[in-house]
Image (cartoon, grey):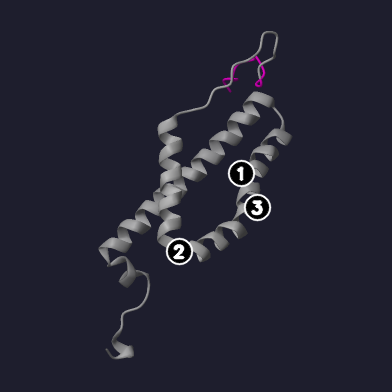
Amino acid sequence: MNPERLPSGLRSVLALPAYRRLWTAQTVSRAGDVFNTVALAVLVFQLTGSGLGVTGVVVAEILPVLALAPLAGGLVAGIGVTPAFLLNAATYAFRALRGPRRRRRRPGERPVLPRRGLRAD
């Protein structure tokens, strides 16, 4: 094909149905991640009334990404993209099917969150 005749740009890429589905799924997923982070920060602020608690939420969201990104890059380079993707999908499926982990409190142990309820502001 003649290089001058190749379409370029976002419109030509989104014309591919498989890529359009992937792009839409990633966009929805990232929007959900943002919504989750904002909701968690608001909840922590309502429960604690502390900006420091919100800072802790942000740090807890960012720190694993910064710490594990170099390791993940090495893993993907070593075993290949498809096995790494399958390992990641299997891990997510296991965690989703396992359900939430609950720790029982010992007698006399205080709850992690304060006893006061959410404020209706």
The N terminus, quarter of image: bottom left
Q: Quadrant of residue 53?
A: top right
**Mark 3 Cα shell of 10 Å, populated few (<14), some (14-19), many (≥20):** few
Judged from the image, the secondary structure of the residue bearing numbered disc 1 is helix
In this rendering, position of residue 83 left or right of residue 42: left
Question: Residue at image x 41%, y 45%?
Answer: 90
- Circle 3 sits on which residue? 67
Question: Residue at image x 51%, y 39%?
Answer: 36
In this rendering, position of residue 101 left or right of residue 98: right
Asked if labels 1 and 2 touch by Cβ distance under 8 angstroms, the answer is: no
The C terminus, quarter of image: top right
Frontmost of labels 2 and 3 is 2
Frontmost of labels 1 and 3 is 3
Q: Residue 106: percent from the left, percent from the top?
A: 66, 12
Q: Which residues are magenta?
A: 112-121
Judged from the image, the secondary structure of the residue bearing numbered disc 2 is loop
Q: Hey, which residue is sitting farthest front in the picture?
A: 79
- Circle 1 sits on which residue? 61
Q: Residue 57: percent from the left, percent from the top?
A: 64, 38
Judged from the image, the secondary structure of the residue bearing numbered disc 3 is helix
Position of 63 relative to 11 (above/below): above
Position of 68 relative to 16 (above/below): above
Q: Amino acid at mark 3?
A: Ala
Between 81 and 1, the one lying in front of the other is 81
Q: Quadrant of residue 74?
A: bottom right
Numbered tag placed on residue 80 in the rendering: 2
Q: Amino acid at mark 1?
A: Glu
Instruction: Specify which label sits upstream in the sequence, 2 or 3.
Output: 3
Residue 113 covered by magenta stretch: yes
Q: Amino acid at mark 2?
A: Gly
| Image mark count | 3
